[in-house]
Structures are given as C-alpha cells and as structure tokens.
Amino acid sequence: MILLYVLFYVSFFILFYNYIGYGILLYILIKIRRLIKRPRETQSAFEPAVTILIAAYNEEEHIREKIANTLALEYPADKCHFIFVTDGSTDGTMDIIRQEPRIQLLHIPDRKGKTAAINRAMPFVQTPIVIFCDANTMLNTAAIRNIVKHYADEKTGGVAGEKKVISKEKGDAASTEGIYWKYESFLKKLDAELYSVVGAAGELFSIRTALFQPVEEDVVLDDFIISLRINQKGYRIAYAPDAYAMEEPSFSIEEEHKRKVRISAGGFQSIVMLKALLNFFKYPVLSFQYISHRVLRWTLCPLSMPILFISNLLIVVATGSLFYSTVLAAQMIFYTVAFIGYQQAKQHIKSKFFYIPFYFVFMNAAVYQGFSRYLQKKQSAAWDKSKRSKTVTV
C-alpha cells in the first residue's frame, strides 16, 4: 500500500508542478528578482540591419500573401534583406517569388528538409541579425522593430516572437490550440524575465547571425536546437510578445495529431542532443527552466497520468476512502469530458468546455507515439506541412 500512495502523490505532484506549479514558482521568483534587480530595458531606436529568412516548400497557395506581408513590414528598406529558400518545391512557388526583385531566391531541386535549407541559406546572410519565420504565417507590421530592440542588450543572443492561432471565420476567435499557445506565451514571458525563453518556436524567432552553428540535418526541431545552443554559449533568448506570427488552427484532429507526434519525437531527440543542459552545476537557472518547462512535459508528465489513475483506483479498491474515491470520480469525469471533446473534434467542432480536457489528454498521449518514432528513428526531418482550416468554435 505504501508504494501505491507514493506513486499517487508523486505522479500528482509532477502533473501539478509542470502545468500549474512551475508558473506559480516562476511568478514568485520574479517578484523577488524585481526587489533585487531592475527589469531589463529595451531601446526602440535600435535599428541594426536584418535578414528575413523563410524556408518554403510547395507554398503556392500562400506565397503571394506571404510576400506581400513580408514586404509591408515597417523597417528601413536599406536595412532589411529578404531570402526565400524553396529547396525541393515542385509547384509554382519559385516562379511567384522570382517576380519580386527585392527577394533573393535560393532553390535546388533536392528536398532535404527545413534544417538543411536553413544550413544552406545561412552563408548568404550578411546582416548581424537574422529572423526566421514560416511561409504560412503572417506577421504584424511592427514585428521587426519589436524584435531588434532587444538586441541592444549584448547578452541577448536571440529573440523569440509570439505565435497566435486564429480563426478567419471569427476574426480573433482562437481555438483551443490557441488557448494552449496563450498559456505557453504566459510561461515564456515569465521564463524570459527570470532569465531566458526555453526554446523558440519556428513560426517566428531570430538570432545573432554570428552565433549560428550548422544543425545536424536529421534534427526535427531545428528552432529548439538552434536557440538552446545559443543559451549554451552564455546568451539569453529574449521574448517579444509584440512581434507575432498568425496562423489558422489545424485542419483536423488528424493533422494536429501528426504535428504533435512529430514534435514529441523531436523532443526526445532534443533531450539527448542537449543532455549537457541537465547539469544544474553548469547551467543552474537554465537547467531549472529547461527541465521544469520542457523535459518533464516530454517525459514524466505523460507517464504520470496513467500512474495517477491506476494507483488511485487501486487505493479506492483497497481502502474505500472517501477522499480517494472523490479524486477518482473527478478523474473519471475529466476523461469522460475529454472523450466527448474527442468525438466533437472528429466532426471539426471545438467546444472549449469539452475540448480543453481532450487537448490535454491528446497532447500527452501523442508523446507515447513520438517516443516510439524516436526509438525506431522513423521521424523524418523533412516535414509535410499541416493543413490549416476554418473550424467551428462554440
């Protein structure tokens, strides 16, 4: 029985800490930090030359809108350069880009994935700052200015932008995928104020060009690896919530599942590649953030969910305790609501009451398949882009 109680409370603590407790702890630490040290300041007048680097694969449907959005960004024209990489594309993406003389196009017929495309394009970057963004996301017009102002601090090696998931049908109405990113954005804000964002998202992030090192071509999460290796060099990744990339939610739950499994497989790959970051003695603050925010979510949290349920069930069977029976009932209701959310998601309906529990379970379940793909080395670095679509939100 003692083992059951240990499993119950340890698994509960891991889940609570990773999804709620870590944010609370960060908030407390930041309050203490503000009493000791003044918040970092940015300089809005700081205007270094920048390069916008976009890797696009068969984006004929979106590329005209992306080009117009990119060229409309507010920044001095003589300080802003544009590079589009279309390696392996077989549609009309390259022909559309060639029509715009302000854009430097890099294209080869071979497709080796986004990581290889970035590695090939970086030697063409001649500016001190490079900004990466996806071909199917649109940026706010002030994005460049809001990113580069953070580089006035010499210890800033990179800047993570914001990702916003929107629905074109209802303007700013976000799906539950968007709710998840709002929560992630909140944690990023806290992480950045304490020390550094822990891994940038590829939709929009930037680095000091001199800090880039080529990434292994089999890497799945290139943005994650690039940004954390800059951390390893002693630089922080700042956060710019006022520089954001907008995209629509996934077309279907199957598309979102494919994306989550890929991220999970890449997460396990990243943990192995960045194993040095598990050393608290070498990276005390960064290791604390990295393990709390990322490692636990990709490892112990998905494992803790079934352990919590099974240990709870066995305790109730053995003792009949009212307290543990209540907790078990709460878990059963949670999973029932999640199952209803799953049924709705298959019909392209996202009711927040049902979908939020489902998305939580779905996100953790995808880790198991991602782990299997990582062990079997079945996850390719070349990614078939997810379909994005309008979704009914109720």
Image (spheres, helix red, strand yellow):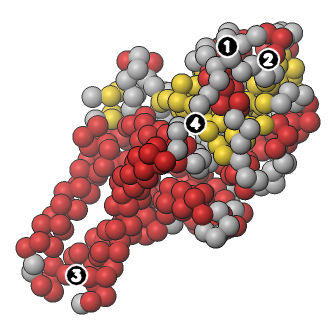
Seen in the picture, residue 348 relative to 223 is either above or below; the reply is above
Q: Secondary structure at mark 1?
A: loop
Question: In the picture, residue 160 is in which quadrant?
Answer: top right
Which residue is under mark 2? 80
- Say which quadrant the N terminus sits in: bottom left
What residue is rendered at 45% in x and 18% in y?
168
Looking at the rendered image, the disc whose residue lies closer to the viewer, 3 or 1, is 1
What residue is rendered at 54% in x and 61% in y?
288
User: Mark 3 packing: few (<14 Cα in 10 Å), some, or many (20+)?
Assistant: some
- Identify which amino acid the numbered label 1 is placed on: Leu
Seen in the picture, residue 112 relative to 83 is either above or below; the reply is below
Residue 306 in view of the camera: no
Give whichever of discs 4 and 2 has the lower sequence position. 4
- Identify which amino acid the numbered label 4 is placed on: Arg
Which residue is under mark 3? 314
Looking at the rendered image, the disc whose residue lies closer to the viewer, 2 or 3, is 2
Which residue is under mark 4? 40
User: Mark 2 packing: few (<14 Cα in 10 Å), some, or many (20+)?
Assistant: many
Horizontal arrangement in the rendering, residue 222 relative to residue 372 (left or right)? right
Residue 73's disc is 1
Farthest residue, direction bottom = 1
Q: CA distance from mark 4 to mark 2?
A: 26 Å
Residue 320 in view of the camera: yes
Residue 122, percent across and down?
A: 86, 36
Looking at the rendered image, the disc whose residue lies closer to the viewer, 4 or 2, is 4
